[in-house]
Amino acid sequence: MVDSPEPPDTLTDPRELLLAYLDYYRDALLRKLDGMSEHDLRTSRLPSGWTPLALLKHLAFVERRWLRWGFAAEHVDPIWGESDPGTGTWSVAAEESTEEIRALFLDECVRSRTIVAGAELHESARSGGGFNPPDHHPALTWILFHMLQEYARHVGQLDVVRELADGTTGE
């Protein structure tokens, strides 16, 4: 696994810094998955049962829920497509390929970047978005910080899973 540097410590524009760190964690997620065998991508090593591939799918839907459905108020389906309907846990169907899940993630990231590029950090989520209660309209900056902490947490969890799977450690 090749380490990728954090955004430079000279970056001081809040928007640029926030977006650079979000991309840093998106890239870190993919780097940690690179080189894992198909078996390891689909095998859980934790009592909760999630797999590395299911985590990637989950984060694709995080992008979809928070930015397309939530902030931009797009009508998208499915919203919770990473969860098994019977158990509610993250899952990847046997017929879903690793390439499909990776493409889904990359596509949702592109769509998220497009939405963010067309908005200011102080803008509130549009009416009709997926927030509850319906009159709740968080600012884009809050949504992006929430996503950043979610990525940081999940990438840290993936660090442990990757080390358990094949001993690989690193950024």
Image (cartoon, grey):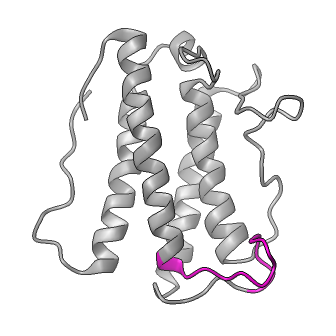
89 in the magenta segment: no
Q: List the single residue furthest toward the right.
A: 86
**Prevailing SS of the magenta stretch:** loop
Give x and y (percent) for residue 72. Answer: 67, 77
Q: Is residue 120 visible?
A: yes
Q: Quadrant of the C terminus?
A: top left
Q: Is residue 85 above or below residue 104?
A: above
Is residue 35 at all visible to an observer of this figure?
Answer: no
Tell me what residue is drawn at x 36 percent, y 28 percent. 159
- Image location (x, y in percent) of residue 2: 22, 32
Snapshot quadrant of residue 149: bottom left
Q: Is residue 54 left or right of residue 140?
A: right
Q: How many marks?
A: 0
Q: Is residue 153 above or below residue 98?
A: below
Q: Range of the magenta residues? A: 127-141
> Does 140 appear in magenta?
yes
Q: Quadrant of residue 91?
A: top right
Quarter of the image where one finds residue 70: bottom right
Residue 27 position, x and y percent, is: 37, 46
Please tell me which residue is depicted at 58% across the width and 65% down the height of the picture. Answer: 111
The residue drawn where x is 44% and y is 32% is: 157
Q: Quadrant of the N terminus?
A: top left
